[in-house]
Amino acid sequence: MRNSFKYASKKDWVAIARDLKPVYTAPSEPAALDAFAEFGEQWEKKYPAIIRLWTNAWAELVPFLRFDQEIRAIICTTNAIESINAPIRRAVNARGHFPTEAAALKCVYLAIMSLDPTGKVQQRWSNHWKAALNAFEITFDGRLSAARK
């Protein structure tokens, strides 16, 4: 998705994102192909490089379409990870260097704890993982339970 924006004017980003969403959220490969054909009809004249980019990368998208919606949502979710990395990076950069490894770990721990001092957000985040956890357990039969033993 982000690579597509590299070839488009910023004023068209919202429209391109809206029109591409049915492609990568399609329930199956044929549905994704239909959605991509519609996207191509709309944008091929203005941005042929985007169409070629998606056509060339189609083989990488197809395995993604085989997963359940819940698993796809987890794969695509980078905001939660990025929101944790930014404060850690800020805390580490503010100190410059650490005398010991334990001091560095303490800094990272305190940065993470400052994100959610009450623990309520963690509880809310974990509720969103229940559907994905069920989908992972069904899709990858027994692999999660074996890892917990």
Image (spheres, rainbow, N blue to C red):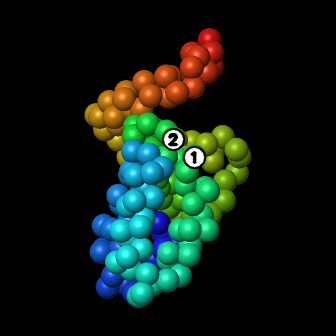
**Badge 1 local density, few (<14 within 10 Å), some, or many (20+)?**
few
| Residue 113 can be seen, yes or no | no
Front-lying residue, 84 or 45: 45
Is 74 displayed left or right of 18 in the figure? right
Name the residue: 42% across, 87% down: 45
Residue on which disc 2 sits: 66
**Vertical placement of residue 71 versus 100, above or below:** above
Locate residue 11, reporting x and y percent. Answer: 32, 85
- Against 133, residue 96 (above or below) is below
Q: Amino acid at mark 1?
A: Pro
* Label 2 CA crowd tier, 10 Å (few <14, some 14–19, many 20+): few
Q: Amino acid at mark 2?
A: Arg
> Position of 90 compared to 34: left or right?
right
- Name, please, the residue furthest toward the top: 149
Nearer-the-camera pick, 53 or 35: 35
Asked which secondary structure carries label 1, the reply is helix
Residue corresponding to mark 1: 63
Q: Position of residue 49 (x, y in %)?
A: 53, 81
User: Which residue lies at the image location 32% right of the left edge and 30% below the top edge?
Assistant: 127
Residue at horizontal 44 percent and vertical 28 percent from the top: 135
Disc 2, disc 1: CB below 8 Å? yes
> Horizontal placement of 125 versus 81: left or right?
left
Image quadrant occupied by the C terminus: top right
Q: From the top left corner, tell me how far across and down residue 126 is, in percent.
A: 37, 31
Q: Is residue 3 visible?
A: yes
Q: Residue 44, relative to residue 149: is it above or below? A: below
Give the Cα distance between marks 2 and 1: 5 Å
Counting every numbered tag in the picture gives 2
| Secondary structure of residue under mark 2 | loop
Residue that appears at 49% across and 22% down: 138
> Looking at the image, which is closer to me, 78 or 119?
78
Q: Which mark is residue 1?
A: none
